[in-house]
Image (tube, helix red, strand yellow):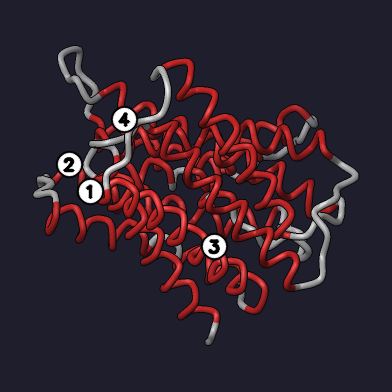
Amino acid sequence: MPAPLLMIVATFLFATMGVCVKLASDLYAASEIVMYRGIVGMLSMALLTRHQGLTLATKVPGMHIWRSISGVTSLCLWFYAIGKLPLATAMTLNYMSSVWMALFLLGGAVLMGANKLDWRLLASVLLGFVGVALILRPTLDQQQLWHGLAGLVSGMLAAMAYLQVTALGRAGEPDLRVVFYFSAGGAIAGGLVTAITEGGLQTHTLKGAALLLAVGLLATAAQVCLTRAYAIGRPLVNACLQYLGIVFSFGYGMLLFKDPLTWPATVGMIIIIGAGVSATLLRAKVAPPPKDSQFNPNEG
């Protein structure tokens, strides 16, 4: 299957996962969904690792811990936002990670004493935040503001996870091992947070168990497609196609959840997609990602 088609399938699967997360949010806390998603991911990655004759042993456990902290926190906030916000809005705010990455790149350039900054990159960052303002339209009496901020922070932490995954790739860690330890971190952290804040696990129903299993399987299948697409395709084309996930989520939201189609939110999403694509293109010219790390942490 060609890389563009793999990427389209991956974004569709991730959007479908978002639907299952939103439905499961009526039955489970975000932390509990993260825990079960982690368990399914662990088992899947362990089986794939064994099938490929690799090992899960690592020489850099500390790097995996830091990657898990940022990635799991991002995932919890993202799942929380999906449960509280229109599906496309939550997806868009999480996909702000490309814009956050551009901001981190600019900040690093300033700290390193760069004499000249790429103002096109800065414009992409500012444009992205204009889109966020249009989506959230923050006011003092808007109850969803905090939910929107959770989605926004999830995108920022996903960008931080990208930096850590890049470092892991340079350290020679295989993709499957990175995903395994991330999933393990999600299972452990999700279980602890659920025990502390929710008083324990919820009783399962057939519907609930099916939704949790679907979240894990859809995420894993999408990750396999995504990883393969980045392995054989062009990174910039893949990064741009990734934004189709917002389009799929928009369709799901209107069809299944009767999410309102407002002009400010629609324009805001278009602006964020444009800012993310331009930031990805410009960032690649400044600091192209290493070839040995195709895993995209934006999808956990």
Q: Nearer the viewer, residue 300 or 199?
A: 199
Question: In terms of secondary structure, where does tag 4 sit?
Answer: helix
Q: Check disc 4 and report the residue beneath it.
A: 148
Q: Check disc 3 and report the residue beneath it.
A: 223
Residue located 53% across and 39% down the image: 100
Q: What distance separates the C-alpha of mark 3 from that of mark 1?
A: 29 Å
Q: Residues within 10 Å of mark 3 (few under 14, many from 20)?
A: many
Q: What distance separates the C-alpha of mark 3 from that of mark 4?
A: 25 Å
What's the residue type where badge 1 is placed? Val
x, y percent for residue 108: 71, 34
Question: In terms of secondary structure, where does tag 2 sit?
Answer: helix
Residue located 71% across and 51% down the image: 178
Q: Residues within 10 Å of mark 2 (few under 14, many from 20)?
A: some
Q: What distance separates the C-alpha of mark 2 from that of mark 1?
A: 5 Å
Residue located 46% across and 52% down the image: 276
Instruction: Name the disc covering residue 264, or none.
Output: 2
Q: Residues within 10 Å of mark 4 (few under 14, many from 20)?
A: many
x, y percent for residue 91: 35, 47
Q: Residues within 10 Å of mark 1 (few under 14, many from 20)?
A: some
Instruction: Name the disc covering residue 267, or none.
Output: 1
Q: What distance separates the C-alpha of mark 4 from that of mark 2?
A: 15 Å
Q: Relative to 270, say whether 197 is above or below.
A: above
